[in-house]
Amino acid sequence: MYTSSLNKNSGDYQKEQPSTTVFKWNYIDCGYPIVTSIGNSGDGVMATEDKFGMIFPGPNGEWYPATAISVGAYTAAGKTPQVDGSVPATDTASTSAGLDLQMDCETGGADVGLEMVVGGGPMGGNHGITVGTHSGYIDATFITPDWTDFDCVAIGWRKVEDFNDGHVPILKTAASGDGIYTDFAAFGALGDTNLETATDLNNSGSSTSTDLGASVPVDAQNLRVKIHVGYDGVVTYGFVVNAVAGAGTLDEPASAASFTFDSGDQIIPYIATLSDTAAADVLYLKDITVKKYPSTDAYATQ
């Protein structure tokens, strides 16, 4: 334990600080999220980049906010994000249930999805980290019966900026292009069945997308992905396929391109999804954890 006599600006003091849980939710252990009424021009009708919010109950009765935009038009026949499927007492690697984030696939729509900032809003707050002052990670588990129905199922960290609906479609292409946001690192199933990373630094105008080769998601099996940002801004990635939600041994993709955020960058954790074809399908989020550490990576275990 530290004492009041220990310099609170010292590394010794900071290393003894516990992590902050920015966001924690599991479809079995937690209550179901509360979603604000969706609709703009009509009840349940949204244009692309319309905003909405959610509140997620944590495992110990705490509450976590999330803020989202619709990517692509959302019709009255669309499906508000909600827990669906047969929720079991214990997850398996192939249980088809969770928070359905497909948005408007129920109507057979293509190029619809969302960007969701977890733990707060897009303009900053305690859910974000400042590179050089904090480290942290976002870790999430998804499942869908057919990964080819979604060109973007990703998590990431991006610089504090207001939403822009042009970002997620760039992730979907899994190719170089202007990712809109000044700085970001995203990881997940990008471009149908590939696992890829996508990054941009200092608004270069052309983001970098890296195909991770043999590392791929599998239909009807859990995909867990994690992005860790070190105190020095260095980004590392981990994934596991066909493990219980939030569990399993993470592998680091060998072919991921190196990326480092600049010291002083203020970055926030987010989820990005986008459908591919006009096939009705589900995309379940089963488990998510975001943590923030005060100074070093000492407690930020992979």
Image (cartoon, rainbow, N blue to C red):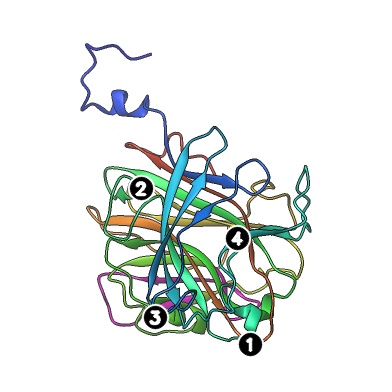
For the record, the magenta segment spans 188-209
Instruction: Name which residue lies at 46% across and 34% down.
Output: 299
Nearer the N terminus, badge 3 or badge 2? 3
Q: In this view of the protein, which residue sits in the foreground, 292 or 133?
A: 292
When the figure is inspected, residue 201 is found, relative to residue 170, above or below; the finding is: above
For marks 1 and 4, the one nearer the N-term is 4
Q: CA distance from mark 3 to mark 1?
A: 26 Å
Image spot of residue 74 (x, y percent): 50, 79
**Amino acid at dot 4:** Gln
Q: Which residue is mark 1?
A: 277
**For the residue carrying disc 4, how many other residues have a C-alpha within 10 Å: few (<14), some (14-19), or many (20+)?**
some
Q: Residue at x 31, y 24 (%)?
A: 12
The mark lying in front, picked from 1 and 4, is 4
Dot 2: element: loop
The dot on residue 82 is 4
Residue 45 in the figure: left or right of residue 189: left
Q: Which residue is mark 2?
A: 127
Is residue 208 shown in magenta? yes
Residue 206: tell me if it is visible. Answer: yes
Q: Amino acid at mark 1?
A: Thr
Task: Say above or below: 131 vs 163.
Answer: above
Query: Label 2, label 4: how many angstroms apart (C-alpha)?
Result: 23 Å
Mark 2 or mark 4: whose residue is earlier in sequence:
4
Q: 10 Å neighbourhood of mark 3: few (<14), some, or many (≥20)? A: few
- Earlier residue among tags 2 and 1: 2
Asked whether, in this view, residue 179 is left or right of residue 287, the answer is left
* Residues packed near mark 1 inside 10 Å, few (<14), some (14 to 19) or many (20 plus): some
Q: Are marks 3 and 2 in contact (CB under 8 Å)?
A: no
